[in-house]
Image: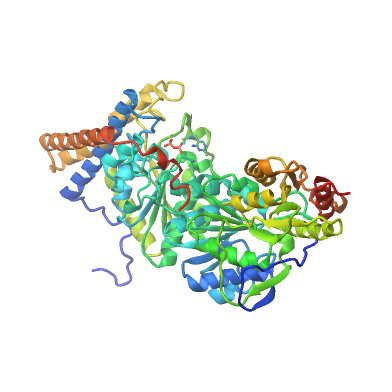
Amino acid sequence: MVHPKAKPASKKPVSTPSRDQALHFYRQMLKIRLFEEQVNQLYLGAKMPGLAHLYIGQEAVAVGVCEALRRDDYITSTHRGHGHCLAKGASVDRMFAELLGKAAGYCRGKGGSMHIADQDTGNLGANAIVGGSAGIATGAAMSAKMRGSDQVAACFFGEGALGQGLLYEVMNMASLWKLPVIYVCENNQYNEYTNYRETTAGEVAARAEAFGIHTETIEGQDVHLVHAKSLTLVERARRGEGPAFLHCNTYRFHGHHVGDVDRSYYRSKKEEEEWKSKRDPVKLLAEWLHKSEMADGKLLDQIEAEIAAHIKEAVQFALEAPYPDPNEVNQHVYA
Amino acid sequence: MKAPSEHSTITNTVTATRQITFAQAINEALAEEMRRDPRVFVIGEDVAEAGTPFKVLSGLVDAFGSQRVIDSPISVAGITGIGAGAAMTGMRPVVDIMFGDFITLTMDQLVNQAAKIHYMSGGKLKVPMVLRTTLGATRRSAAQHSQSLHAWLSHIPGLKVVVPSTAYDAKGLLKSAIRDDNPVVFFEDKMMYQLKGPVPVDEYTIPLGVADVKRAGSDITLVATSSMVHIALAAADALQASDVSAEVIDVRTTSPLDKEMIIESAKKTSRAIVIDEGYERYGVTAEIASIIADGAFYYLDAPVKRMGAMDVPVPFSPVLEDQTVPTAEAVAEVAKRLCNKR
Ligand SMILES: Cc1ncc(C[n+]2csc(CCOP(=O)(O)OP(=O)(O)O)c2C)c(N)n1
């Protein structure tokens, strides 16, 4: 018999994800993976102006977090932002169009890879200033609270942003005012070409804890774990219980950007191989689906073929789409 | 030392007016806009019970509560970024940056974020935010509390910049700034807060981007901003004795800039001096002088002159500081020379 004053168990067992949910996560993660591989091809084929920072290897973070959000919740993103955009609901054709500087792109070709914003899915924009969006995400959370909406904002940033003062200014205010914002630190181990341990004193989690912010450090390659944790933190924020800091350990499988091919001077092949073979979030989910008998190889192949076809079509659309009218250059400077 | 004059001219009001200070005008504009629009809120250091060190916001927290007049930590970049995020998602924040010198700390959030978001998003996102701050020397506040850095922000596409010179303009322009869908930086001369001027009892707004003839004249145009409008008006008074009729144009907003009115006045008078309290080099005076040189070239009888703050960090000692800002005497001297009057 349960004692009337007994506290409820603090750790509820994580319920097994449903087959539908798991397959949906798989589709979303694979979409990001194949999208990014295609971006790399566009770069190698000299079809894309500029560079891009690929999200491959980190898919479980974007999908796990965004699947815990509603469509009208906000996100802010980073230079490595394609995964966040797609996970929040952006469509691949308009993403490709933006990357190619076409008028059909999410920003009419004015933003490009590092500035994709999509108001319809609550995406307040990728940001090419490391740590630059922490204020915007916190302000969006403040606005949600002031308007009495129960929206939540998720602020994605790499561990490199831990070096920027703005983050600490706004985390302080978020904690003081119990703002519904989740700071998602994607620790892919490297600030560009430097291991984060060379740039980051103390423990990452301690930095948020210092502000009294609820903090979790987790394996970011397990989408179910990221999702379950995010759900708890998001619902907590939605109830008015304040901000949270989710520190996800992850890894980018490619270079810092598409042109960063020779990486031996800052990280070893062995390290890369270890992550790719043992901690690939897409493979891990595929294995999980197999093991729990939710999908066989045939189904997964079929899903992959569907997504690949979708991506192919979207790239074709973007390649054929017209550029913006040159007269648009001085439009949208002012609202 | 520049002394605030009582030269506020009212050109386009028909209603009853009363004399209020520049600070009261700002306070009234905020109160009216907060009453009108529940999305408007104020955030900054010591803005609530303290009403700012200049007491410009006194009483607002009593009227609107601490949920809308929010005391923030001393996090200048943080409140600017939070303002931008709130503005993008349905609010209309008025961010208070205590001294214009601290604008340096807002730079990324203003210049790389707020100013560019509308453009970068292809016109989808908007940042209807106002950032109020100060400019102006001669307060014996030394190098880090005396600068006039409005030129920096006037340089940036996507920002609007307001530099009012009278209580009347301050109120009407601030109301427009709050209703504007763009990030607007609003510079108030701290020496002017106690300057009184006539302000209509009834509500009014002044559009951004329209200059104002503060005094009509025919021999020379004095184009001025903010604090320097009063210097120009005092110079114009003094020039009367030398039989020089000076026209004083108050640009009111450096971005957008009313180029047309400035050029037309220079064409009419054939001479111009541009006066601004920002550093002279690469400054507002350089921009406006080049616009006049370009737009009125064939009408000019003399080179366009620029008078800005001396290119030194603002010194503390009064005998040093007073030399750094254009004075009415200096402006009158230059004007007489340009008009060949001695
Ligand atoms: C303020 C600022 N400094 C430097 C850069 C150049 N830069 C772009 S990405 C990057 C590394 C960021 O590392 P991290 O935040 O961990 O993100 P990751 O690239 O690992 O996803 C740097 C230094 C920048 N964009 N902004």
Q: Position of residue B182 (x, y in %)?
A: 49, 55
At 49% from the left and 62% from the top, the residue drawn is B92
Q: Is residue B334 visible?
A: yes
* Residue A255 versus residue A11 in the image, above or below: above
Report whether B161 appears left or right of A141. right
In depth, the one of B143 and A46 nearer the eye is A46
Front residue of this view, candidates B230 and B266 = B266
Residue B327 coordinates in the image, percent (x, y): 81, 53
Its colouring scheme is rainbow
User: Looking at the image, which is closer to me, A239 or B252?
Assistant: B252
- Is residue A187 visible in the rendered image? The answer is no
| Quarter in which the N terminus of chain A is drawn | bottom left
Residue A314 pos. (x, y %): 23, 37
Q: Quick check: A297 above or below B131?
A: above
**Residue under the image location 72 percent in, 45 percent down:** B279
Residue A31 rendering spot, x and y as whole percentages = 24, 39
For residue A296, above or below residue B56: above
For the point 59% across and 44% down, the residue is B155
Give left or right: position of B242 versus B8.
right
> In the depicted view, which residue is nearer to us: A167 or A84?
A84
| Residue A116 relative to residue A163: left or right | left
Asked where in the image residue B135 lies, by quadrant, the reply is: bottom right
How many numbered marks appear? 0
Q: Quadrant of residue A290?
A: top left
